[in-house]
Amino acid sequence: MKLDKIIKVLQRTKIKILSLRDIKKLFEIDSDNTAYKTAESLIKKGILERLKKGLYASTLNFPEDFEVANRLSAPSYVSLETALSFYGILSQFPYPITSITPRKTRRFEVQGKEFEYVHIQTSFFWGYEKQKGFLIASPEKALIDEIYFMAKGWRKIDLTELDLSKLNKKKFKIMAKKIKYRPFQNLLKALSI
């Protein structure tokens, strides 16, 4: 497929992030090798940018950071300090962009930005919603995730820096009861949220 047709397809579909499978389907390519060579050619021409091996962003419709976060490691949702900052509960924007995943803990660097993925057991992988094209924890679940990892000794945050008036306290309490982990429940009591 010629470059002008590729550009038209990317503009028409408004696809922001593509895998090799997407490239094969969009550009009607049969082999993985040809799809890879097409991706490499489009990178050299400035049409695509590599996010990680086999995953690319269209420079014609570049994705938001949280959209990138969801695709670098799937399944995942933006949470912890990043989500708390997004909702205005935490006043400063944290570095890196942090997500929760049932997969292993890992980090990626893309365009000088760090993306961190924190493992959580599958039974706690809930409480997120789709907003503006990305998955993010609800304000209440973001705080629950934060307290859960504090109870495990893996995270520290000064809770006095949080504006808890932006939380639905009733929803928070209902959601917090679902976490059947004694250190979490003990910390929650001590914090008296």
Image (cartoon, helix red, strand yellow):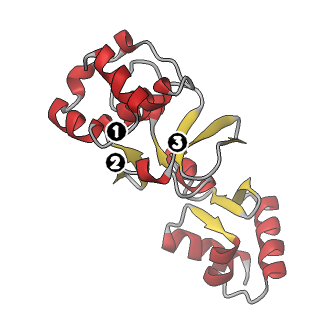
Tag 1: amino acid: Lys
**x, y percentage for residue 160?**
35, 9
Mark 3–mark 1 Cα distance, whole angstroms, equals 12 Å
The residue under the point 65% across, 35% down is 113
Taking the image as drawn, is residue 47 in sight?
no
Camera-nearest label, 3 or 2:
2
Check contact, mark 3 vs mark 1: CB within 8 A.
Answer: no
| Mark 2 vs 1, N-terminal side | 2
Residue that numbered label 3 is attached to: 99
* Mark 3: secondary structure: strand
Figure quadrant of residue 16 = bottom right
Residue that numbered label 2 is attached to: 127
The residue under the point 47% across, 17% down is 157
Tell whether 149 sits left or right of 163: right
**x, y percentage for residue 67?**
51, 51
* Mark 1: secondary structure: helix
